[in-house]
Image: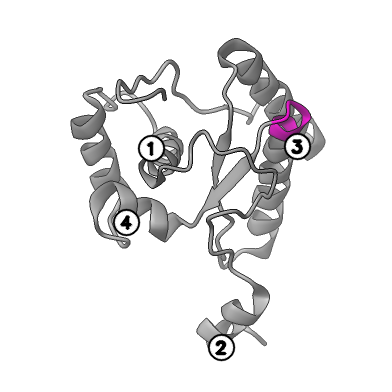
């Protein structure tokens, strides 16, 4: 995304089901992020902050995947900005509890693109980038991965989810 004339040069998702080992999937994520960085030379990376799910194994795998993506960006000197799912939805739709479909529909309107052929994971990633653009943080150089984000910590999780802590 550049200046006032926003463009979406590429959008999609990685299909990793053909890789049996989790390590192979992580390697593919790292390599693909590196390819994207080499092709488009972004100055920054915006990423959705981890969220707390019910399945600890899924959370662990997601955290590893996010870590690999962050490492790929950092290897190329890109500062990382994290946004909570709620703040992304709030920025794009004005409603922090908006459905994924609503986020995608508003992205289509605001960016004048057709997302009907893409998975909602792709529009989620685009929403994260668009949120970063709307925050006006693009262009500022920072290596702090949490700049501008309200990172969830375990204390907050326990306080907000007493029924899920045993």
Q: Which residues are magenta?
A: 72-77
Label 3 to label 1, Cα distance in Å? 21 Å
Identify residue for label 1: 130
- Secondary structure state at the residue bearing disc 3: helix
Structural crowding at the residue carrying mark 3, measured as other residues with C-alpha within 10 Å and reported as few (<14), some (14–19) or many (≥20): some
Local crowd size for mark 1, using a 10 Å CA cut-off: few (<14), some (14–19), many (≥20): many
Between marks 4 and 3, how big is the CA–CA gap? 27 Å
| Applied colour scheme | one colour
- Camera-nearest residue between 160 and 79: 79
Q: Which residue has dot 4 on it?
A: 90
Left/right placement of residue 85 relative to residue 61 reads left
Say which residue appears at 58% left-offset and 79% top-offset.
156
Task: Check the picture and name the quadrant holding the N terminus.
Answer: top left
Residues at badges 4 and 3 in contact (C-beta under 8 Å)? no
The secondary structure that most of the magenta stretch takes on is helix
Is residue 73 a member of the stretch shown in magenta?
Answer: yes
Q: Which residue is mark 2?
A: 162
Q: Quadrant of residue 40?
A: top right
Q: Please state which of the two labelled residues, at mark 2 or mark 1, is closer to the viewer.
A: 1
- Determine the CA span between mark 2 and mark 1: 33 Å
Residue displayed at 32% across by 51% down: 91
Percent of width and height locating residue 148 = 53, 55
Where does label 3 land, which residue? 71
Query: Of the residues under marks 2 and 4, which one precedes in the sequence?
Result: 4
- Which circle's residue, 3 or 1, is located before the other in the chain? 3
Other residues around mark 4 within 10 Å, as few (<14) / some (14–19) / many (≥20):
some
Of 42 and 123, the residue lying toward us = 42
Of pointers 4 and 3, the one earlier in the residue sequence: 3
**Callout 4: SS:** helix
- N-terminal of the pair, mark 2 or mark 1, is 1
């Amino acid at each position: 995304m550049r200046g006032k004339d926003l463009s979406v040069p590429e959008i999609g998702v990685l299909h990793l089901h053909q890789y049996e080992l989790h390590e192979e999937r992580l390697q593919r994520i790292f390599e693909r992020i590196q390819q994207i960085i080499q092709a488009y030379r972004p100055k920054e990376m915006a990423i959705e902050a981890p969220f707390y799910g019910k399945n600890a194994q899924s959370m662990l795998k997601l955290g590893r995947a996010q870590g690999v993506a962050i490492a790929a960006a950092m290897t190329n000197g890109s500062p990382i900005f994290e946004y909570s799912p709620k703040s992304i939805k709030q920025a794009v739709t004005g409603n922090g509890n908006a459905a994924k479909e609503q986020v995608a529909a508003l992205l289509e309107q605001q960016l004048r693109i057709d997302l009907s052929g893409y998975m909602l994971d792709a529009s989620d990633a685009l929403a994260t980038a668009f949120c970063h653009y709307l925050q006006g943080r693009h262009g500022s150089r920072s290596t702090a991965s949490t700049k501008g984000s309200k990172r969830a910590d375990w204390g907050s999780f326990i306080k907000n989810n007493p029924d899920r802590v045993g």
